[in-house]
Image: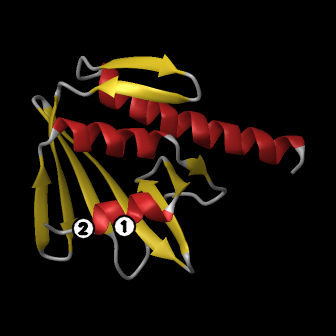
Amino acid sequence: IGSCGGNMIMKKKNSFLVFVYHLYTDFSCVWKKSSAHYATQADEITSIDITIEENTVNHSDKTWISEVIADISSSEPTKKESVQDFPQVESYIKIDFRLETGTSTIFAYEDRGKYYLEQPYQGIYKIDRKLFERLKEIE
């Protein structure tokens, strides 16, 4: 990757990290840097709604929320751009972060055996299958 490509990747990663950061700071949550990962206290996230097709599951367990946020924060930027309100794939998982002051939405999906998170108009990020499978679980 030339210096331009590397800069674009860093901008996308930084953009997504800013999204995750704002998810917390805009809603009075606290970030603590610990070794190579972030631990969070997501007190202002009241729940996360996971919607697959017409089925929605609400997760309000703080441990589950913290684990999902930690997995999301470890996602890697791609060179793909998000240019629509919804991912341009046949099926996706809608992830709504419910906060006392509003909602923030991202999407997860599989495309050609790889797994992604998409923040509309901000970026597309690669995630591991473990996170995707966790999000797919309808309890």
Seen in the image, is 107 located left or right of residue 27? right
Residue 53 numbered tag: none
Disc 1 designates what residue?
Answer: 133
Q: Residue at x 53, y 53 (%)?
A: 125
Residue 84 visible: no
Instruction: Name the residue at the right extreme.
Output: 2
Q: Residue at x 52, y 55 (%)?
A: 124
Where residue 4 sits: x, y (%)?
A: 83, 43
- Picture quarter containing residue 102? top left
Which quarter of the rendering shows the C terminus?
A: bottom left
Residue 137 numbered tag: 2
Q: Nearer the viewer, residue 63 or 89?
A: 63
Q: Residue at x 13, y 75 (%)?
A: 54
Seen in the image, is 88 located left or right of residue 56? right
Residue 97 visible: yes
Local secondary structure at mark 1: helix
Q: Nearer the viewer, residue 93 or 128?
A: 128
Where residue 126 sits: x, y (%)?
A: 55, 57
Q: Amino acid at mark 2?
A: Glu
Where residue 81 sits: x, y (%)?
A: 57, 57
Contact between marks 1 and 2 (CB within 8 A): the answer is: yes
CA–CA distance in space, label 1 to label 2: 6 Å
Where is 34 relative to 17, above or below? above
Where residue 135 sits: x, y (%)?
A: 30, 61
